[in-house]
Amino acid sequence: MIKIWSVKKNEEAAAKKKPKMTAAQLRVQKDLTELELPDTMKTHFPDPADVLNFTLTITPDEGIYKGGQFNFTFAINPNYPHEPPKVRCTQKIYHPNLDLEGNVCLNILREDWKPVLNLSSVMVGLQYLFLEPNPDDPLNKEAAEDLRRNRQSFISNVNTSMRGGSVKGERFDSVLIRS
Amino acid sequence: MGANGLANGSSSLSGSNGLNGESSKRYASYLANSNRYEAVDRMLDRRGPWTDEQFVGGSEAKAFLRQKAKILVIGAGGLGCEILQNLALTGFSDIHVIDMDTIDISNLNRQFLFRESDVGKSKALCAADFIMSRVPGVKVTPYHGKIQDHAPDFYMQFAIIIAGLDSISARRWINATLVNMVDEENEDSLKPLIDGGTEGFKGQARVILPTITSCYECSIDMLTPPTVFPVCTIANTPRLPEHCIEWASVLEWPKTFKDKKLDTDDPEHIEWLYQKATARAAMFKIEGVTWQLTQGVVKNIIPAIASTNAIIAASCCNEAFKIATTCAPYLNNYMMYTGNSSIYTYTFEHGKRDECPVCGGEASLVRISKDWTLEQLVEHLKEAQEFKLSRPSLSSESGPLFWYDPPGIYEATKGNLDKLVFDLLGPEGGAVSVTDKALPAANLSLEIQFE
């Protein structure tokens, strides 16, 4: 195989003055500026100079979780998009795919992450969890069991939890939108 | 190239890959035949007058070609079939092929790896099966799908990539991906891209060494725009059969069917256009409207010529062979072939565009006045001919300067619009990274200097 690199080295080294931004920053700029979020999702940047850390608010307009407002933090490391963003829920929510510490069970945040995916895919995936909670892939096994056994009782437990009430001895955060 | 030895294998093709006793014997004797690569070996066993100093020849070059070199073929259509055949017979043995298409009956006249029974099946899969059954010892790995669905990691595994594509957007994508993959710290990140293309009797082959030679994006303005006729001509003064067909498809169809979209794959739609165009042609005494021409005009079909594909594919594979073995200098860097005026070829070095948005190594230099506000710079990026952006978002090393989206960053940065770029970047100016949907590359780098 021809040694192309030597051709490259022989080239006159052009003074490159590219911004000292990491590939992750460049990619995040592209992802964020091209986001087309529905009204049900909003991003918030506590420090607008740091685009690698921000929050996402989801306010589902249908489904069991309608009426609630759910906050997630996004932390993106320099290996993005090689590694997925780290996403956590900041509230304690009664949901089959979220545990009480705010960990999220979403395939594209772990095993199915690919660099061709982007922040938009993750956000859409998160919103989908509220529209279609998935009992087959549980992080909160009790909630998953509840949903699988009796959908009506699950719905009423979700409503209790969203008001800040207790379900099975566990107290949840109030997430209702104050109107 | 390398046609010797093929006669042994040719009769083993019976449609199935299963080997019976006799053909397995033939298979083994073919693989054991040391004369198999006799013709190719002649080029690898000694130097030629122009052979590169790096050339070591002999067993090392052969081993790389036949055991190590992993090569990706993008497209298993007219060019792809020829390319796969050539590579397999030249001695490449680890070939990968990707194509998102399925086989159509109209492909069969030139895409010779497919048979009538393959219609509707994946091109990549059928092509791989055919090559493997026909050329013993060659492994072809097919991928049925879009090139865009594979991340840079996927492309990193190959030594060389050959593209036989029919789409500009796919070429731009693979070109930008390979240029962006080049990592100064990693020699293996530089993947030669050999791009073949044909259009009727014309064709081209080029060698792109990402960040070293001109890239596909550098020459994007050389592409001829598709033939479009002025609406006033097709509406009022048709002279050609094409004008009548365009009149039917552009003006009459929407008028008659309102919101119903013209489906150029629907024979009934084509028939309707053909009838309309024929009537109009008769009115203006124009000859030449046929059903086939109607379909050709509305689908923008350029007839594919099998021999053009063969010539261009041969050139591409020749380059792959030379790059893989160093046995002769590779193409520098653009060969065009014009078969409609005898068999004319012209080879030239297409220059690298410094300001190419994909491979322009340096940042695009923008000289502005010290009293420019950031808003003036943003407007300049929208209006200036060399940028023509729609919603540019700008960052400096210290973070976003001004972003249109998302709303949080927009609110936080819109105040900067009234500030002087001089104050934001400092008296020395500096580097600014721009994203915009209109950019084929992920980012545009600007180097701002003050007058």
Image (cartoon, helix red, strand yellow):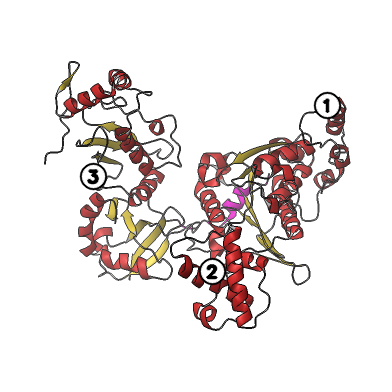
Q: Using residue B441 as the reference point, say whether residue A32 is left or right of it.
A: left
Query: x%, y% of residue B164?
Result: 65, 53
Residue occupied by mark 3 = A45
Residue depth check, mark 2 versus mark 1: number of the one nearer the observer = 2
Residue B20, disc: 1
Q: Are marks 2 and 1 in contact (CB under 8 Å)?
A: no
User: Is B361 contained in the magenta span?
Assistant: no
Question: Badge 3: few (under 14), some or many (20 or more) residues near its Cα, within 10 Å?
Answer: some
Q: Nearer the viewer, residue B38 or B263?
A: B263
Chain of residue at mark 1: B
| Residue type (three-letter) at the residue carrying disc 2 | Ser
Q: Nearer the viewer, residue B297 or B247?
A: B247
- Pick the quarter of the image with the C terminus of chain B: bottom left
Q: CA distance from mark 3 to mark 2?
A: 50 Å
User: Is A8 contained in the magenta span?
Assistant: yes
Identify the residue shown where x is 80% and y is 28%. Answer: B19
Q: Is residue B93 visible?
A: no
| Residue type (three-letter) at the residue carrying disc 3 | Phe
| Residue type (three-letter) at the residue carrying disc 1 | Asn
In the rendered view, tell whether residue A146 sits above or below residue B96: above
Identify the residue shown where x is 26% and y is 27%. Answer: A102
Chain of residue at mark 2: B
Query: x%, y% of residue B215?
Result: 56, 58
Q: Farthest residue toward the left?
A: A179
Query: x%, y% of residue B57?
Result: 77, 43
Q: Farthest residue toward the top?
A: A169
Residue occupied by mark 2 = B249
Q: Which residues are magenta?
A: A1-16
